[in-house]
Image (cartoon, coloured by chain):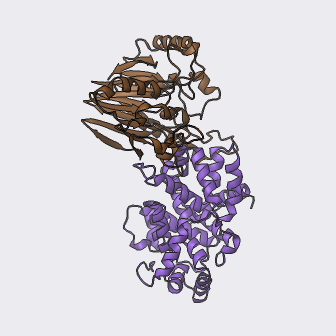
Amino acid sequence: MFSVRFWGDRGSIPCPGPATVKFGGNTSCLEIRADERLVIVDLGTGIKPLGDYLMANDFKKGPIDTDIFITHTHWDHIMGFPMFTPIFIPTSKLRIRGPVSYEDDTLESIIGAQLSYRYWPVRQSELSADIQYDQLKETQLDLGDGLTVRTKYLNHPILCLGYRFEYQEKSIVTAYDTEPFKNLFPTDPEDPTYNEDAAIEGEAVAKEENEKILKFFEGADVLIHDSQYTQKEYEAGKVGWGHSSYEHAINSGHKAKVKNLVLFHHDPNRSDDQLEELEQQYRAKIKGKTPMQITMARDGLCLEA
Amino acid sequence: MVCPMEALVSDEAIKKIAVYIKSMPSLPTTVAKVLEVCNNPRTSPADLNQVISLDPVLVGRVLKLINSAYYGLGQQVTSLVRAIIMLGINTVKNLALSSAVLRNLSSRKDFQALNMEGFWRHSLCVGVAAKILAKKRGIDPKQAEEYFTAGLLHDIGKIPLNAVLAKEYVIAVSVSDRERISLYQAESKMLGVDHCQSGSMIAEAWRLEGAVGDAIAHHHNYLEYEGPYKDILYSVVLANRFAAIMEIGFSGNRFPDKIEPVVWEYLGLEKSVFMDIEDTVAKEIDKAQIFLML
């Protein structure tokens, strides 16, 4: 059994309220199960209900032992950590890994800074769980029991990793937060800052980097992709913010022959009604054009790879 | 006629150079512009690319970062355009800023033996000429940037010599003048280390292995070079000659070696090419000068 369950799929900030009841308002948190192994991706506010679930179920069978991968250290992806109950249990073993940006502090100090008296009544040094931190780059890790993970740098304003988990020839891939690489150099010769070499090379680099990302997705059983905006919204002032459009996520998934695409990292202003409508619209648009299934992520959704 | 990599090297000098390289400051010519461009929240990638491109130390530092184990990338990145697209404008901006405002910012008086503006112009000229020669020969435009970088950085080893062994370097330059020998030979005679050797230390510290590192290390002993980047190395050697003949910039060497015919033959170029590219190179340097408001 290789599956992923969604505990938080909102981008930027938690947004509880009557308009987000169906899809949920927690920020990103995934629970991946490879038979007995538990992997968590991101420590957004979804980690709170996941922690409660683990204490009520897994903990009865034995101590919590898990690998946690952080996609990047923006606040919405780490802010749930202080409320993750297993960190207060002495028998818990947590291995937390993720990227940190150049010249930043260590992963431990970035995540742990939230546990200081000015923000929280408990300090990091008071946590009783056994927690190990590791900084990650582009790499491949063998997590044991046949479970592996490969990482890939994405395109976000800070260093951000996508993860490709593989188990028994099945794959679950994350690609958030990210937007397509693009040529950042003017291609119009009339532009006063135009430089022919930079324009040509910029085009080639963006193309190559986007191809590498597609290769990373290739044949994924489940791809969980950033889709904070519609293409129209993206083009109307969100370029460079580090998030993708539904259209880009769908096209990429299709090109990479992905089986199940999950649209993820919903904009905090997107209501349940809007998400349902968008889901229907995009399903209708791709009907008959691709064998790929698309689903809007929602809290509680569980997919088997 | 080789860089004496083995002889005469003073341990103390090497130690001093190594310490200096660790916090090597940016060239003062460009610092004000770097600060202006990087402090502007609306700076475009094109502006950032331009301001960094004009400073051999900054180019080196950005490439060092992207090639460091820190990012763990499989490929060697030698172009700034790629670095900005991959790392993002913010990271590159921060890096340029931190490099430009390092506490021991090199000041104009640090350039005792070398004239700072002359050095900058020479470096830029060799970078631009190497790139234009490559384009003339039909080299893939995607690779042209690497020719530029290799040319821009080829003499970078002179910076620590000039800063750390300042008095001795003044003597080395005058010995080169008096004895009519190339500066690297005078350096080796007077300092026990030449700029190819200190340049290699920088290349190693900045992880500029490959074509750029080889151009830094071997632009004076190119005849013995048997590595895989002969095309770029020879282009830099020729561009260096071009800068000397056309007297564009000055990096302390009044008696540069003549280059061997094998360089022309290998690159398939005639001597008339210098006349062909003169205008284009001059225009590129002028553009840079206007940008920096020198």
Q: In the rendered view, tell whether residue B130 sits above or below residue B9.
A: above
Residue B164: % across, % down? 58, 76
Chain coloured brown here: A
Q: In the rendered view, tell whether residue B294 sits above or below residue A257.
A: below
Q: Quadrant of residue B281?
A: bottom right
Q: Quadrant of the C terminus of chain A?
A: top left
Residue at 31% from the left image edge and 33% from the top image edge: A63
Residue A10: % across, % down? 52, 24
Would residue A238 be found to the left or right of residue A265 on screen?
Answer: right
Residue at 56% from the left image edge and 77% from the top image edge: B256
Which of these two is toward me, B86 or A295?
Answer: A295
Which of these two is toward me, B109 or A199?
Answer: B109
What colour has chain B? purple
Q: In the rendered view, tell whether residue B134 sits above or below residue B258.
A: above
The answer, for residue A59, to whether it is visible in the render is: yes
Which of these two is toward me, A84 or B54?
Answer: A84
